[in-house]
Amino acid sequence: MDDINQALADLPAIDASVLNSSGSGPYGMTDAGYLPKPYARLVAEGLANARALMGADVDAGQGSVIRKLIEMTAIEHARLYTLVGSLVDDLTIPTARGEGLDRLGGELGLPRPFATAAGQVTLKFKGAMPPGVTELVVPVGARMLTTGGHHVATTQSARLTAAVPNATVTAEAFYPGPEHDLDPANAAQKIKLWNADDEAIEPISAIASIRGPGTALEAVVDIVHDKPFTGGAYRWPDDRYRSLLLRAPRSLWSARGIELAASLVPGVRQVKVIDLYGGLDIDMAIFGNFNFAERVFGSERNLVTPYLFTILVAPTAAAIWSGPDGLAAQIADTIEDLRPVGIFPEIREASEVYVGVRANLVIEGIPLPSGDRATVNASAPALAFKQRLLERCRGYVDRLEFGEQVSPAKISWALMSEPGVVDVRDLRLLRYPLPPSEIDFAGPASANAVDLLGCGEAAALAGNQIAQFIDNPTDLTII
């Protein structure tokens, strides 16, 4: 026992000498988290222990047997420290990964959600255009169906003309999960119907009504689904899932809890719970110290008056808001068991401000056909290139929050991030509808009035507004 105590007493002296010689930083549990012991320190400690046990004249130089044994042992110890570090990291949400993050999410009652399946469909215009109509625009978010009840929406707009009646666009399942990996070989999973309840397909409905009663929507624009959808079996990546868990509430009847539940409803882009009087959150200092018969959750009020809070929802382009199966009804059903008794929500749809981009592009290294500017911009390679640029712009706009302005500088950065773009000139944002300050109430109203902002001017939004991007490739000109 005395020998063990003596050995333990010698360790601090060995550790101090090793620290001075190796110059390693802190390790173990620190304020910054768990830090594995560096490999160089493990080797230095092994050499120090060898000299303490075998004498200072032990041969521990390069190529010696003892040195090789110490180095091999240090490798195994370093792996052990790394394993311990990963186990410690998996104990907290900010640092957990993979299965460790899944376990933490399960403890919160939030399993890792499935991704949405995606694929391509071809839209074919059938028949002739009505008089005065030059093109048919199928917008982003147009809803399609299968005979088996699967819902799908386009993620790109399509412009069908008499000269170009066909267009292949990307689409994704409206609901997540592997059951929406649609295989066209299965008749129940083949996409071939339009959703008549969707307002986005109104242009198709208008042409169908012109052609006469009983004209099916599919007789105007045919849907060709010949390749399977994939990706529905995947789960959310760690970063997205971690962000969800960090927002998860740890208490009942909280605004954060309702906001989180509403955000997971398919078709919700962003959501904000507005609770002006604090009726949802019960973590105030006064809670637990008053008579519930006199004061309920906060300020005094009439007990027979229902308390209301507002849920501001920005739907995705594919969402259908109204109806018994609409997004508003689904949100109300989702939060029914989360709201306090007697406190009811007012579910309000956010006001969408449509924003487009008009700019001249200087490109290099992109193979394009020869000809005048109009011919080059109308070519298939140019349209595909501009579609990639518009997807970058959409990714930026879709991440904006309520009331956040659309910055032309960030739009320019998104365009310049695409390989092949050398310069972006005369970039201006288009806004629809017009802001109230620019509406001429004395003159005739125009449904197509678009506000062309000045060069470098951002599109400002109100607190209940959110930007929606319009992908019009004709607004981008390759010069």
Image: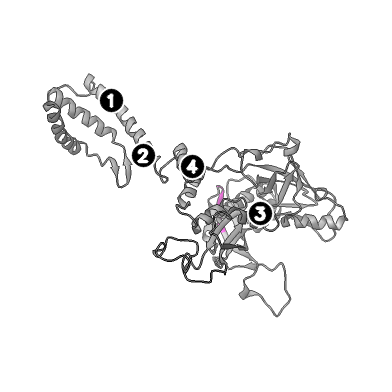
Q: Residue furthest right?
A: 212
Mark 3, residue position:
319
Image spot of residue 439 (x, y percent): 66, 75
Residue at the extreme top: 65
Segment colored magenta:
419-424
Spatial CA span between label 3 and label 2: 41 Å
* Mark 1: secondary structure: helix
Of 282 and 82, nearer the camera is 282
Percent x, y of residue 454: 58, 68
Instruction: Between residue 359 and residue 214, name the one nearer to us.
Output: 214
Tell me which amino acid carries mark 4.
Gly
**Mark 1 to mark 2: distance in Å?**
23 Å
Quarter of the image that includes the N terminus: top left
Label drawn at residue 106 = 4
Quarter-wise, where is residue 347 in the image? bottom right
The numbered disc on residue 88 is: 2
Q: Is residue 116 above or below residue 185?
A: below
**Residue 157 x %, y %:** 69, 52
Judge from the rendering whether residue 14 lies leftward or rightward of residue 231; answer left or right: left
Dot 2: what SS?
A: helix
Residue 438: mark:
none
| Mark 1 lies on residue | 73
Q: Amino acid at mark 1?
A: Thr
